[in-house]
Image (cartoon, rainbow, N blue to C red):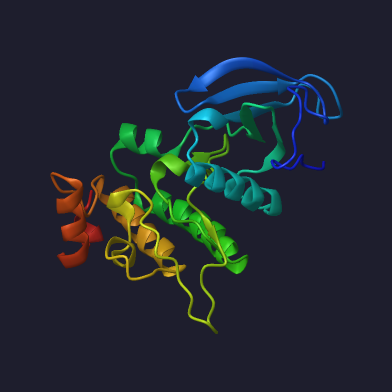
């Protein structure tokens, strides 16, 4: 179905059909909603609501970036955007509802995963990240909270608010110098602000692997400053045979 561009105004009734709010999901302005007419009637979606009045200019740019990125992606390991529309005061992103929770919740309950589970998750995450890079997109926020799980146990990457399109080109060697992401998962080149590209995602991938195998973060100080110092200086040794 065509997506309503964020740059164009729409009423609370989306031109693609009416959407009813069923229940509130969490404190991030995400609601569980149901389509009540059209060919996908009764389909349940996750609706992300952004209030324009509280969004800074940078946040508005990131919101549009997230919408534009999701609109161009259709991949089994990335959450899909089904509709996007806006009213005078709010922006709405109607996303695929993934029923299995997130990797953070599962990791919190189990503390660490078996190597078999880790290999399974990492394989799917790697496929998703590689697909983004092939499209010229750097994710920049890989962490357990942003990895949803389907009922069958497959992964879905979500939350593209910090992602960037076409920031790295082999011919021009252009990079991004933004300081963004979750500190514990940041690559050294983001921490020192010397410019980063797609490789930053693979650093976060390695941090995630360490966390899933050991139940702890490889870099975690008493403050953000301490954590960043560890990222720049520490040398890690991962002994998988002794983990369990």
Q: Tell me what residue is drawn at x 42 percent, y 49 percent.
A: 117
Q: Residue furthest bottom?
A: 171
Q: Tell me what residue is drawn at x 63 percent, y 15 percent.
A: 22
Q: Is 23 placed left or right of 15 in the picture?
A: left
Q: In this picture, is 39 found above or below 218?
A: above
Q: Tell me what residue is drawn at x 67 percent, y 27 percent.
A: 88
Q: Is 78 placed left or right of 224 in the picture?
A: right
Does residue 81 show up?
yes
Quadrant in the rendering for residue 132: bottom right
On the image, the x and y values in percent for residue 118 come to 39, 52
Q: In this picture, is 51 found above or below 22?
A: below
Q: Tell me what residue is drawn at x 59 percent, y 50 percent.
A: 65
Say which quadrant the N terminus sits in.
top right
Q: Is 126 placed left or right of 195 in the picture?
A: right
Tell which of 73 and 49 is nearer to you.
49
Q: How many numbered discs, if any?
A: 0
On the image, the x and y values in percent for residue 79 come to 61, 43
Tell which of 147 and 73 is nearer to you.
73
On the image, the x and y values in percent for residue 148 come to 51, 40
On the image, the x and y values in percent for residue 73 come to 67, 53
Does residue 155 show up?
no
């Amino acid at each position: 179905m065509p997506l309503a561009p964020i740059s164009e105004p729409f009423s609370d009734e989306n031109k693609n059909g009416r959407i009813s709010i069923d229940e509130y999901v969490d404190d991030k302005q995400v609601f569980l909603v149901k389509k009540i007419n059209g060919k996908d009637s009764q389909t349940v979606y996750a609706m992300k609501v952004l209030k324009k009045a509280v969004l800074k200019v940078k946040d508005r740019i990131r919101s549009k970036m997230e919408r534009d990125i999701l609109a161009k992606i259709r991949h089994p390991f990335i959450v899909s955007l089904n509709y996007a529309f806006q009213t005078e005061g709010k922006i709405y992103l109607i996303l695929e509802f993934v029923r299995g929770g997130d990797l953070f919740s599962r990791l919190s309950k189990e503390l660490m995963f078996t190597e078999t589970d880790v290999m399974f998750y990492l394989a799917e995450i790697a496929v998703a990240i590689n697909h983004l890079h092939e499209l010229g997109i750097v994710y920049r926020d890989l962490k357990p909270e942003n990895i949803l799980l389907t009922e069958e146990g497959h992964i879905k990457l979500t939350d593209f608010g910090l992602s960037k399109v076409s920031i790295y080109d082999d011919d021009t060697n252009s990079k991004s110098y933004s300081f963004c992401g979750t500190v514990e998962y940041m690559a050294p080149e983001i921490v020192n602000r010397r410019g980063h590209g797609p490789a930053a995602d693979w650093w976060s991938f390695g941090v995630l692997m360490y966390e899933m195998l050991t139940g702890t973060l490889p870099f975690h100080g008493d403050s953000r400053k301490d954590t960043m110092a560890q990222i720049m200086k520490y040398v890690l040794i991962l002994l998988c045979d002794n983990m369990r």
